[in-house]
Image (spheres, grey):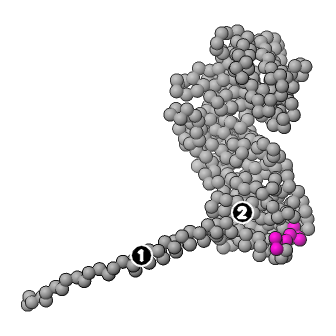
Amino acid sequence: MMMKFYTFTFLICLFSKLQGHCKSDISLGNSLTLTSPLEYTPGFMGKAYIMETESSSTREPGFKAALTMESSDKDDGRYLCSLQIFLGDVRVWSSGHYSKMYVSSKCIIELTKDGDLRLKSSNKHVGWRSGTSGQGVERLEIQSTGNLVLVDAKNLIKWQSFNFPTDVMLSGQKLDVATQLTSFPNDSTLFYSFEILRDKIALFLNLNKLKYSYWEYEPIEKNTTVNFVRLGLKGLDLFDDNSHIIGRIEQPLIRFLALGNRTGNLGLYSYKPEKGKFEATFQAVSDTCDLPVACKPYGICTFSKSCSCIKVVSNGDCSSINVEEAVSVKRLCDHEMVELKGVTTVLRNGTQVRNISKERCEELCKKDCECGAASYSVSDESCVMYGIVMGVKQIERVSGLSYMVKIPKGVRLSDEKPNVRKWVVGLVGGIDGFVILLLLSGFAIYFIRKRRKSLSLPPPPPLPQQPANTDS
């Protein structure tokens, strides 16, 4: 491990032409090579810092740009090569966010003499580039905001990392309408996105052609349109076409906004000097059950924050269902619809049909091979159909609201009884019912013991007799 450390330090000094520290800019013609271990090492992470900013506060970390090599998630003998920006230990930008570059032994970064920033492998294959050849680029800089830029002799920006957002938005950064942050969970085809729309900002769950929002924030001022958002000193601000603030998620001293790749939650993060780390001071979704992946597909997030299950697969085991299997389940056309009492979904923006009956809503989903579930509201006679059963949570039963799931014909109980409807409806809240039963039993035992104890105590002594009142 010490050998790796000294190798990286030598390469840093060779690239920056300094001794012991990095500078904030790099001129044309420089290159840096990062070499992997002699034998493939799963879980390996090599990092060589090439430039850094001076922190505005001695108590808070600054930004650093680094060339990195990470072992592949598939452990196939290859390494991920990327240019990354870190705020302290937090990665806030990566060249490999959308398109990953794999190398076998060497990762090379160079700023060519004609002004193109490139990542190459040992065989000189270019896996990523800025595309700025012939634009007069003079040097690569990292600004105090964490923005990595290529500038010309007049300090005009020819390329910047702020124009290629990943899953993090930094303080001072601006996102226009139709731009987005994206986050990709490991080993899954779904991804999350934070998007700026003309009427709101929102979080979306994306899966193939399916796209559903699960959190939205609209401007405070009505009848206004969003033009861009910016993370400022007071929080996340929404601006209209005239650059007037029309909405704000207020959180002071925020350093960055991040879209989590595991839960899809959006957080605003500030630095806690006493703990030496960043913490979320605001989260868009505060309740676990309001997240789209609180449970696996065909799972139900209950009041106790545990996951119940709608057992629609042949083996009756919902814990093993992944997103891909859930999509294949919905493609089965020979189904029946089952209504689940006391549940709903956090997903929005499904296919909506208005002015129809509940029976018609059920029939529409039943005949549509791409429909996996449907919700119905009696008050506005609206039917919303969904292509996947996700984001389902338990709620207090509300009259006039229905959530129906498509169940393959032939699904059986563990005891082989064919009463599918009774089984599924009874399943919802089963875990919570058990918890409530335990609580009631505990209270009953407590009161019984208390009563027995009171009966076993000797009776209190009689009160002394008061003399009769003789006053007239």
* Majority SS type along the magenta span: loop
Label located before the other in sequence (2 or 1): 2
Whether residue 132 appears in this view of the structure is: no
Q: Is residue 82 above or below residue 385?
A: above
Q: Residues within 10 Å of mark 1 (few under 14, many from 20)?
A: few
The residue closer to the viewer here, 20 or 130, is: 20
The residue closer to the viewer here, 29 or 226, is: 29
**Left-right relation of 276 to 392:** left
The structure residue drawn at horizontal position 81% and vertical position 70%, both measured from the top left corner, is: 414
Q: Position of residue 426 (x, y in %)?
A: 72, 73
Whether residue 295 appears in this view of the structure is: yes
- Dot 2 corresponds to which residue? 308
**Left-right relation of 263 to 96:** left
Q: Quadrant of residue 25?
A: top right
Mark 1, secondary structure of its residue: helix
The structure residue drawn at horizontal position 66% and vertical position 39%, both measured from the top left corner, is: 258
The kind of residue on which mark 1 rests is Lys
The residue closer to the viewer here, 412 or 400, is: 412
Pick the quarter of the image with the C terminus.
Answer: bottom left
Mark 2, secondary structure of its residue: strand
Q: Is residue 124 above or below residue 162?
A: above
Residues under labels 2 and 1: Cα distance?
40 Å
Nearer to us of marks 2 and 1 is 1
The kind of residue on which mark 2 rests is Ser
**Left-right relation of 39 to 260:** right
Q: Residues within 10 Å of mark 2 (few under 14, many from 20)?
A: many
Whether residue 4 appears in magenta in the rendering, the answer is: no
The residue closer to the viewer here, 74 or 331, is: 74
Q: Is residue 255 above or below residue 11?
A: below
- Dot 1 corresponds to which residue? 453
Residue range (magenta): 408-415
The structure residue drawn at horizontal position 44% and vertical position 78%, both measured from the top left corner, is: 452
